[in-house]
């Protein structure tokens, strides 16, 4: 009986074992040899965009994925064992491997940004769909890699100062109305592609392209002309126009409110083992920490009727309408021709003699307008003798105002004033070629720097340029009450430009005078008065030259125009006054203004 029971139990166990073996056979017969079923595994992808995950192209468009670390390329899911007895379920986490990733660059990319990307030495992808990395226009959710600022420009002798974005878009669409109508917009091909992406295709004939090195010349040859250039392509022969009141060459520039900017991003089209921060790109082509605005002014003489009005209304009266413009510059230049003298008589508006002094309290006006540097080339600097001159120099030193073009003796008068701002190194030199003799410095007496044969000035310019300075040279030249320069003006001003000066400016003129570009320099033969009581029509008009430097380069000049009121108080010109004035000055400079009404 017991034996029968044992036999039955063994038969049942055999049947159950056979069933289990059969079941395992069917379960494993569907798998290739050497594989076992695994739990689902997710390989994390590094999001290089920094924002929302970038959509991947279709699988068929992707290049073959690189083999994962620790797996044979032919069988990426087969584990590699470090020892024969390693447990069968000990798997390594797969990660992407490093390799040269193909880079696709948007054809509309600005040249400077393209050059930065090419410096990575990554292989070029034939199209966006075959790229591992894409550098192009930023989508709304992308992390912005670079913001590029563009400028609306025209040839320098243009009286139009600004437009609205609607005016610019009208020109893009070849509208027959608006201030830009009738002339194409000049730009390079890459700029055209960039704004086509922003605004859509331009109307036929609305855009004219030229190579970057030919663009300025083409615009000057085809006036009236308008163009769009990236900020880094600005140069002095181009006038920058405002768009919606914003100008990228000004310190009060509001990038958020400016329409001529384009954002670019760098995104990955597939998982890669590469950190975005390792790929260096300029964040922008306009870094405010590299910008310097210098404001140059003409004659300041706080005497006669100007001084009388200061006594009656207040010392700040001349600055009521122009002070904020002067203070807004990073460096404000004042050419003060007059010594401060404690015994100076009360100002007489009808004074007939030409021996001048200013009450020392008037220096408060120069403080109020933000004076940063003082020019002393004037021929009235010694009118009240050496002691008044030396006392005036001490007043400047007390305020930490560097001076040039005059000094305590000849050596001091010929010293350059050196200023560095935002990495831009500026050197100021000046001299007086006409005297009178008592006004000029000697080896042991103060006064204005004599020009002599200009050789010392040329030598200093060469030395300063070799040290990385941009040189601003100024003259107290012979006075002429006309806009056109004389032949001697041209000879001497051009000689200093040929020596390497960046800006050559006349501080002597009581009426505004012509200007020119020569040997890479901007020459302005005379700016007119700033604070002086001459109310005759030609003398009432004034230039204040705003020169822009960026990253060690001179890139632009803005002509600010003012009109003297009440013998003492300059104000900015009204629009029609300014247009008439600029047209006259451009004609005197030999530049025809061809803008349409």
Image (cartoon, grey):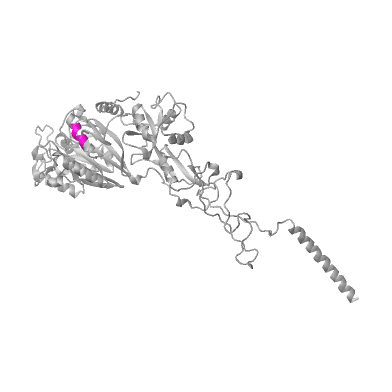
- Residue 596 drawn above or below residue 53: above
Q: How far across and how far down the image is residue 279, in percent?
A: 45, 50
Q: How far across and how far down the image is residue 115, in percent?
A: 42, 43
In depth, the one of 202 and 546 nearer the eye is: 202
- Residue 33 drawn above or below residue 487: below
Residue in view at x 41 percent, y 40 percent: 111
In depth, the one of 519 and 235 nearer the eye is: 519
Would you identify the image quadrant in which residue 259 lies? top left
Query: Is 437 displayed left or right of 323 in the figure?
Result: left
Asked if the stretch drawn in magenta spans residue 145, the answer is no
Quadrant showing the N terminus: bottom right
In depth, the one of 265 and 179 nearer the eye is: 265
Q: How far across and how far down the image is residue 38, in percent?
A: 66, 58
Asked if the stretch drawn in magenta spans residue 490, the answer is yes
Overall secondary structure of the magenta stretch?
Answer: helix
Whether residue 76 is visible to the viewer of this picture, yes or no, is yes
Would you identify the image quadrant in which residue 250 lies? top left
Whether residue 509 is visible to the viewer of this picture, yes or no, is no
Pick out the residue farthest to the right: 1
Q: How many marks?
A: 0
Query: Is 493 displayed left or right of 242 in the figure?
Result: left
Quadrant showing the C terminus: top left
Q: How far across and how far down the image is residue 574, in percent?
A: 29, 29
In depth, the one of 438 and 307 nearer the eye is: 438
Pick out the residue farthest to the bottom: 2
Query: Is 470 displayed left or right of 390 in the figure?
Result: right
Magenta stretch? 489-495
């Amino acid at each position: 009986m017991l034996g029968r029971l044992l036999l039955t139990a063994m038969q049942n166990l055999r049947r159950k074992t056979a069933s289990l073996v059969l079941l395992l056979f069917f379960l494993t017969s569907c798998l290739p040899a050497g594989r076992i079923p695994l739990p689902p595994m997710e390989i994390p992808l590094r999001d290089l965009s920094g924002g929302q995950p970038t959509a991947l192209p279709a699988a068929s468009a992707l290049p073959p994925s690189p083999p994962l670390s620790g797996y044979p390329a032919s069988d990426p899911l087969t584990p590699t064992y470090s020892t024969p007895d390693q447990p069968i379920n000990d798997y390594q986490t797969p990660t992407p491997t490093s390799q040269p990733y193909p880079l696709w660059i948007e054809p509309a990319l600005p040249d400077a940004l393209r050059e930065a990307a090419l410096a990575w030495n990554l292989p070029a992808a034939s199209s966006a769909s075959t790229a591992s990395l894409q550098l192009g226009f930023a989508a709304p959710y992308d992390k912005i890699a670079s913001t590029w600022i563009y400028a609306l420009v025209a040839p320098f002798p243009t009286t139009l100062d600004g437009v609205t974005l609607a005016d610019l878009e009208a020109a893009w669409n070849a509208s027959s109305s608006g201030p830009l109508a009738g002339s194409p917009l000049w730009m390079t091909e890459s700029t055209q592609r960039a704004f086509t992406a922003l605004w859509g295709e331009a109307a036929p004939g609305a855009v004219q392209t030229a190579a970057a090195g030919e663009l300025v010349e083409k615009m000057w040859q085809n006036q009236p002309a308008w163009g769009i250039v990236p900020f880094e392509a600005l140069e002095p022969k181009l006038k920058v126009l405002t768009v919606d009141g914003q100008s990228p060459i000004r310190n009060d520039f509001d990038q958020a409110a400016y329409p001529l900017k384009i954002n670019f991003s760098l995104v990955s089209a597939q998982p890669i083992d590469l950190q975005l921060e390792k790929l260096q790109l300029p964040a922008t082509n306009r870094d405010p920490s590299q910008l310097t605005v210098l404001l140059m002014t003409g004659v300041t003489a706080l005497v006669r009727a100007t001084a009388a009005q200061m006594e009656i209304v207040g010392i700040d009266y001349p600055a009521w309408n122009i002070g904020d413009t002067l203070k807004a510059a990073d460096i404000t230049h004042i050419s003060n021709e007059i010594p401060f003298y404690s015994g100076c008589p009360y100002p007489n508006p009808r004074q007939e003699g030409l021996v001048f002094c200013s009450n020392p309290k008037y220096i408060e006006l120069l403080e109020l307008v933000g004076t940063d540097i003082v020019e002393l080339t004037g021929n009235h600097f010694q009118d009240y003798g050496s002691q008044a001159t030396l006392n005036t120099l001490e007043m400047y030193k007390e305020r930490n105002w560097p001076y040039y073009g005059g000094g305590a003796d000849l050596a001091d008068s010929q010293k350059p004033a050196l200023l560095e701002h935002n990495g831009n190194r500026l050197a100021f030199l000046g001299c007086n070629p006409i005297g009178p003799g008592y006004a000029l410095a000697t080896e042991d007496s103060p006064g204005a720097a004599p020009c002599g044969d200009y050789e010392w000035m040329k030598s200093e310019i060469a030395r300063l340029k070799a040290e990385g300075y941009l040189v601003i040279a100024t003259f107290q030249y012979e006075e002429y009450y006309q806009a056109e320069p004389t032949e001697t003006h041209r000879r001497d001003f051009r000689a200093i430009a040929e020596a390497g000066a960046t800006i050559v400016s006349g501080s002597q003129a009581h009426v505004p005078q012509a200007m020119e570009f020569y040997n890479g320099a901007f020459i302005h033969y005379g700016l007119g008065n700033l604070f002086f009581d001459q109310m005759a029509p030609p003398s009432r008009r004034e230039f204040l030259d705003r020169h822009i430097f960026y990253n060690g380069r001179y890139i632009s000049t803005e002509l600010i125009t003012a009109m003297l009121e009440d013998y003492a108080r300059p104000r900015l010109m009204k629009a029609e006054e300014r247009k008439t004035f600029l047209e006259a000055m451009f004609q005197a400079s030999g530049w025809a203004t061809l803008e349409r009404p």
